[in-house]
Image: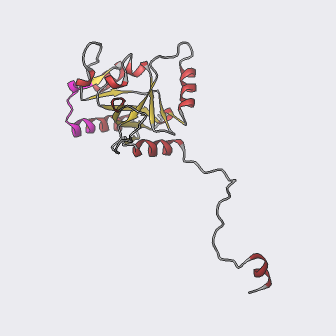
Amino acid sequence: MGIWDRFFGQFTGKKPKQSAYMPIKEDPIDISFAKNFTSKGGRFLFCESSDSVFNNYKEICIENKWNPSAILCLEKMLSLSLDIKLFDQSSENLKSFKAAVIFCEYLISDSGKILLSEHQIRHFKIPDLPETMVVFAKRNQLVKDVSQGMTFLKNKYKKQIPTNIRTLNIKSNVIKEKFSSVPETSAKNIYLLLEEDS
């Protein structure tokens, strides 16, 4: 052993451990969202164009054997695009539908949840909606957390902030914990069709 080895230790070729003072490298928000969303049981389809969004939507309907009359649509634009009847009554049992198709306000990266408002679900409560939700979103709707989502929501609707703001939770395939904070009825099976920004 040389003199320098005695003072500084023998070189082993191993990289030093990362300093505790270095910031932890975080995933980009799209990767973080995808990990959090799918780890809870959400089904995620990334679409490069609006054509692939509609093709994937058709495949989901075929896979689940849904006909158009079994799908709930609360938004006029989606109703026209997907050729589904717009639901405009408030007395019918919404849970009798196989699925609902909706847009969303924002995708919450740190929790994998989906932020909704009256613009997507009107006055209805999440438990009143069908068991399965097909959500259409764009990549530019990704936000870091609920706080950022609420800030963006206030800026988006400066004249009148929407009501009925909710987060849509995923019905996990994992066995529920004894003291789960999310009631069983408010969680849904979710397909997310995420389109690249146009």
Against 164, residue 39 (above or below) is below
Residue found at the very far bottom of the displayed protein: 1
Which span of residues is magenta-colored? 59-71
Q: Which residue is found at the position 45% from the left and 43% from the top?
A: 36
Q: Name the one closer to the observer, 51 or 163.
A: 163
Report the residue that reaches farthest toward the front. Answer: 178
Is 159 situated left or right of 2 in this image?
A: left
- Judge by depth and name the residue closer to the eye, 70 or 77: 70
Query: Could you tell me which residue is drawn at 32 percent across and 28 percent down?
Result: 101
Task: Give the dominant element type of the magenta stretch: helix, strand or loop.
Answer: helix
Q: Percent x, y for residue 57?
A: 30, 35
* Quarter containing the N terminus: bottom right
Residue 83 in sight in this render: no
**Residue 20 on image: x %, y %:** 67, 55
Visible in this render: residue 18?
yes
Q: Residue at x 54, y 48 (%)?
A: 27
- Dividing the picture into quarters, in which one does residue 175 lie? top left
16 or 57: nearer the viewer:
16
Q: Is residue 150 above or below residue 51?
A: above
Total number of numbered discs in the rendering: 0
Give the residue drawn at x 53%, y 13%. 160
| 40 falls in the magenta region | no
Q: Is residue 124 above or below residue 41?
A: above
